Structures are given as structure tokens and as C-alpha cells.
Image (cartoon, helix red, strand yellow):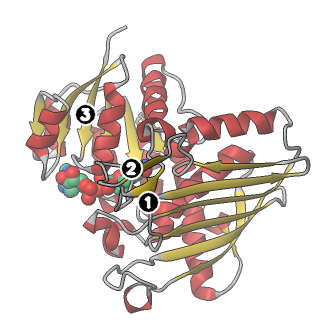
């Protein structure tokens, strides 16, 4: 079978996660990249032959099968819609799907009408530890799920776009909490129906990052359609590296997953070394360096699955369709409404 020709829109952090994963996918070939900065460095690092300052020109001139959309959130809609209109077969869109429900709906509708596969890049769904957790649940290992908790937290975003609500649609919940929000329905087989949220107010009302216009701390209680309960959290006030944890409580047992700090390596270093885990600022003393974050956080499997689904003409893997991205967005905006009003909010009103 011929290799899929890949285009990447964006050239920084998320683009790097995708490029590292395409490199490990024998049936894909990175062919072109479009970005407004870091273009030559990125293209050279990943040996991508074609480079463009404008993504529309890339879609017009190159015969691409699949693209990765790795640009700031507010650009997801225009890049996805223009890729669909250019006739691409598959589009992978980074999380969150969009910065408004209107944009998200339009992306899903345009791709559906043009029969373009829109795939939502919730990487947790492809993380090996979480795939194994779901297998154990499906085998009845912990009975029926009663309560689930999920969080992603770290010390602040590297991206200036993620620090400004007008570019990203919110703060820590839409950027970090969206991982458990997107992942928990896939894990439990249940949609989130009702939310009760609390977030800091952005700017001076933030706990720490007063120059972020979105919230730097956010949490929400959830009710699933079968009555199971949940708790999700995202914050930018956590020192010591990214902290991604999931706890699952069933009638017959529990599962705890530590995605980022659960390394089998324990290192004591007096001089320090290059890199331990994402967003950790020190490598001195005792650390638990990640063995392979591209794999453990799900990116490698995710890209391989998306490539296979375009090659074989299959629907996106469970939990990763454009519609799934839209549902995650609806939960997020319901949480924001609840945080403002102090009331429980039904997610359905956003769908
Ligand atoms: N799944 C994950 O774990 C994960 C992690 C980080 C970021 N993300 C998501 O990936 C997306 C990008 O985030 P990032 O951290 O890489 O941001 P970033 O700020 O590091 O990079 C933004 C990129 O967008 C490019 N860009 C901006 N405007 C453009 C335009 N008009 N045309 C072409 N390129 C343009 C820039 O050149 C740059 O390469 C965001 O939606 C973010 O939420 C996902």
C-alpha cells in the first residue's frame, strides 16, 4: 500500500508531537508543512521537503491525503474548513475542537457534507496505560463504574495563544481539563449529562497567572447518563512537571493511573541532566524521567490509528470523531456557564 502523504499546519509544540509520531509510522510520509514561524527549523528537523507560509496555498499545490491541524485553537475552524473544501481525505484536529460551539458545528457539518474524515486528537484515548485500564474494566475487573476522576495540571502554557481567552476560548479547563472531559465518556461508555463547575476569573482573579485572561484553575463535578459521578480538573498552578492522573472507582475494585509521574526510572542526579518530564523545571536530585512520553501519552498510537483509518476507509476510532470533539466542547462550555451562574447545567443544551 502507498504511504499517505501528510501535511502539517503548525510548526511548534503540538506539531512536534505529531511529527515525532509520524516518524514512527511506516505507512505515512511527512510531505509538507505550513506555519508562520519556526518553519525552516521544523522542516529541517523532520526532513519535510515542502514548506509554506500559508496553509491554503499548501492545500492547493500539494496532493495531500491527511493533515494535522496544530495551530492555536481560534484557527482550528478556518484551517479545517479550508482543508475540507480543498478535498483532503482526512483531517486531524488538535484539542479543543474549536473556541465556540458554532465553529465546532460548522467544522463537523462541512466535513460530513464533503465526506471528509474529521478526527479529534484526544491522545489519552490512545495511551497504552488507559487502553489497558479500559480492557480491565470491560473484563469486569472492577465491577460497575461508580465514580471517575481525571486531571491534567502543570505550571503554565508555553504558548502565548493559550494564555489569552480570545485565542483559545477559555483557560485551564478548555486546554487541560478537556483531556479527561474527552476521555471519560470513552472509558465509561457514558456521556456526561450534567455539570457543576468552578473556575478562577482570569486576570487579577486568577490564583497565580494574573496576565492570563482565561482561568488558571478549574474543576467540575459531573453526572453521567447512567448516574455515575465524575470529577475533572485542569490547572496552571502545579509545579514539578505535568501531572495527569485518573482514578476509577467500581463496585468491585479501583484503578489508579499516573500517566506522567509513573515512570519505572528513578534517577538521583547532582549536576542535573537534559529532560525529565513535560513542564518540569529541574532535573536535580531525585526525579522520575519519562521513558517515552510520545508513546505513554498516546500520540504514537493515535497517529498510527488515524493513518490506518484513512488508508482503510474506516470511521475514526471510537471517541475520536469530530462529533466526539464537539461533545467535549459542549461539556466545557456547560462547565463555564455553571461556574458563572453557580447552578447545575445540562450539557444537552449546548448540543
Ligand atoms: N494534545 C496535546 O497534548 C496538545 C499539547 C499541546 C498543544 N495542543 C494543541 O495544539 C494546538 C497548537 O498548540 P501549540 O502548543 O503547538 O501552540 P504554539 O503556540 O506552540 O504553536 C502555534 C503554531 O501555530 C502556527 N500558526 C499560527 N498561526 C498560523 C497561521 N495563520 N497559519 C499557519 N500556522 C500558524 C505557528 O507557526 C506555530 O507553529 C492548540 O490547539 C493546542 O490546544 C495539544
Q: x%, y% of residue 174?
A: 48, 65
Residue closest to the eye, 126 or 313: 126
Is the CB atom of the residue marked by disc 3 within 8 angstroms of ligand 1's nearest atom?
no
Identify the residue position indicated by label 3 in the image.
Answer: 7
Pointers 3 and 2 in contact (C-beta within 8 Å): no
Query: Given this view, does label 3 or label 2 mark the residue nearer the observer?
Result: 2
Q: Is residue 19 above or below residue 245?
A: above
The residue shown at (62%, 80%) is 338
Q: Nearer the viewer, mark 2 or mark 1?
A: 2
Residue 329 pos. (x, y %): 53, 60
Q: Which secondary structure, mark 2?
A: loop
Residue 127 locus on image (x, y percent): 55, 39
Q: Secondary structure at mark 3?
A: strand
Cα separation between marks 2 and 1: 8 Å
Residue that numbered label 1 is attached to: 241
Image-based side of 137 in relation to 319, left or right? right
Q: Nearer the viewer, mark 3 or mark 1?
A: 1
Categorize mark 2 by other alpha carbons within 10 Å: few (<14), some (14-19), many (20+): many
Which residue bears the numbered disc 2? 276
Amino acid at each position: 500500500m502507498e504511504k499517505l502523504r501528510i501535511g502539517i499546519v503548525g510548526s511548534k509544540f503540538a506539531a512536534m508531537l505529531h511529527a515525532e509520531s509520524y516518524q514512527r509510522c511506516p505507512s505515512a510520509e511527512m510531505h509538507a508543512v505550513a506555519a508562520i514561524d519556526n518553519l525552516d527549523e521544523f522542516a529541517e528537523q523532520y526532513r519535510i521537503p515542502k514548506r509554506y507560509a500559508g496553509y491554503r496555498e499548501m492545500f492547493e499545490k500539494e496532493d495531500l491525503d491527511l493533515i494535522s491541524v496544530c495551530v492555536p485553537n481560534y484557527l482550528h475552524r478556518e484551517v479545517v474548513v479550508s482543508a475540507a473544501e480543498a478535498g483532503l481525505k482526512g483531517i486531524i484536529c488538535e484539542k479543543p475542537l474549536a473556541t465556540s460551539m458554532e465553529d465546532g458545528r460548522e467544522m463537523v457539518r462541512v466535513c460530513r457534507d464533503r465526506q471528509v474524515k474529521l478526527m479529534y486528537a484526544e491522545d489519552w484515548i490512545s495511551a497504552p496505560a488507559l487502553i489497558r485500564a479500559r480492557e480491565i474494566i470491560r473484563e469486569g475487573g472492577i465491577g460497575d463504574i461508580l465514580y471517575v476522576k481525571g486531571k491534567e495540571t502543570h505550571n503554565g502554557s508555553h504558548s502565548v495563544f493559550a494564555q489569552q481567552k480570545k485565542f483559545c476560548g477559555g483557560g485551564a479547563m478548555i486546554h487541560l481539563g478537556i483531556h479527561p472531559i474527552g476521555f471519560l465518556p470513552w472509558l465509561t461508555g457514558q456521556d456526561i449529562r450534567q455539570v457543576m463547575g468552578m473556575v478562577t476569573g482570569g486576570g487579577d482573579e486568577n490564583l497565580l497567572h494574573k496576565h492570563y485572561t482565561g482561568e488558571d484553575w478549574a474543576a467540575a463535578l459531573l453526572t453521567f447518563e447512567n448516574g455515575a459521578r465524575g470529577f475533572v480538573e485542569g490547572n496552571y498552578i502545579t509545579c514539578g512537571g505535568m501531572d495527569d492522573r485518573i482514578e476509577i472507582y467500581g463496585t468491585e475494585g479501583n484503578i489508579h493511573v499516573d500517566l506522567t509521574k509513573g515512570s519505572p526510572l528513578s534517577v538521583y542526579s547532582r549536576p542535573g541532566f537534559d529532560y525529565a518530564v513535560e513542564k518540569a523545571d529541574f532535573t536535580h536530585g531525585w526525579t522520575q524521567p519519562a521513558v517515552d512520553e510520545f508513546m505513554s501519552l498516546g500520540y504514537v498510537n493515535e497517529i498510527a490509528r488515524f493513518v490506518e483509518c484513512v488508508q482503510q476507509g474506516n470511521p475514526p476510532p471510537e471517541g475520536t470523531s469530530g462529533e466526539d470533539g464537539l461533545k467535549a466542547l459542549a461539556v466545557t462550555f456547560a462547565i463555564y456557564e455553571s461556574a458563572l451562574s453557580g447552578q447545575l447545567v445540562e450539557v444537552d443544551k449546548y448540543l
